[in-house]
Image (cartoon, grey):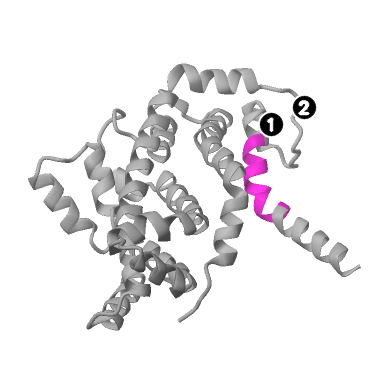
Amino acid sequence: MGNAARLIVLTALALLFMVPYIWMVSASLKPTDELFRNHMALIPEHFAAVQNYGRVLREVPVAQYLWNGVVMCGGILFFQLLFAIPAGYALAKLRFAGREFVFGAVMLGLLVPPHVPALPLYVALSAAGMLNTFAALIIPSTISVFAIFLFRQFFKSLPDELIHAARLDGMGEAAIVWRVALPNAWPAATAFAIFSVVAHWNDLFWPLIVVTGQDRATPALGVMHFRTEEAGDDFAALMAACVLMTAPLVLAFLLAQRRFVEGISTTGLKG
């Protein structure tokens, strides 16, 4: 009885959190006039999926926006893992002067919102002539203090005997990081990858600052361009554009959900 009640509660909460997305998918299938009725129905009376999605695919470079999002999120994730994994390993397994101070600085970094360094970053990228490039989208997010913290916590739970055995075999610290620690950290890496990709795929603040035009527009920025320039008051087509832009995230999460849950559950809070 207890398991059944827990399942019912979890299902109800899941449906509650999914309501906005379900409504968005439903709205993308309706003609615009059905969206403004005084009662809400998820199932359209008249299906307009062909018209809505057809308009988006005709008038919006959806493939370009999705490709830009893949390049940006892939580049950011690559550099975040490249820096965070060795840093997390060093803070968890190496003994050096000032280690706790460095970890404290990482924790303080979690408190700094991304809007704070936006102005100096913009000035620096502008002076370097890098605005409206993939580099401008990727560089400010290459170091993630959250990733360092996450991997530090995960590596703290890694048995010291495994590290000592690798050292006895003659492996250097760099080899241990990439050949011993990383293969054991794939659940944490997958969990962080979901967090990172979702955050930057949906980010509008920074792309809106450094990107002009549609050549480097990300999915979130592309939806905004569609709303202001193409869709007008056609909110049904706008919802169709949103569904297309978010579909890769939903698919990626469904494919990686087991690793994601495993990474969250095994990344302890060991001090």
User: Vertical placement of 15 versus 244: above or below?
Assistant: below
Question: Does residue 19 belong to the magenta stretch?
Answer: yes
On the image, the x and y values in percent for residue 169 come to 35, 63
User: Vertical placement of 227 versus 39: above or below?
Assistant: above
On the image, the x and y values in percent for residue 228 come to 40, 33
Label disc, if present, on residue 34 of the rendered structure: 1
**Front-most of 228 and 106?**
106
Q: Residue at 76% of width from left, 33% of height from top?
A: 43
Magenta span: chief secondary structure: helix
Name the residue type under label 1: Glu
Q: Is residue 269 left or right of residue 110?
A: right
Query: What residue sits right under mark 2 in the picture?
Result: 45
Q: Residue at 19% of width from left, 57% of height from top?
A: 119
On the image, the x and y values in percent for residue 226 come to 42, 30
Quarter of the image containing the C terminus?
bottom left
- Dot 2 or dot 1: first in sequence order is 1
Quarter location, residue 243: top right
Q: How many marks?
A: 2
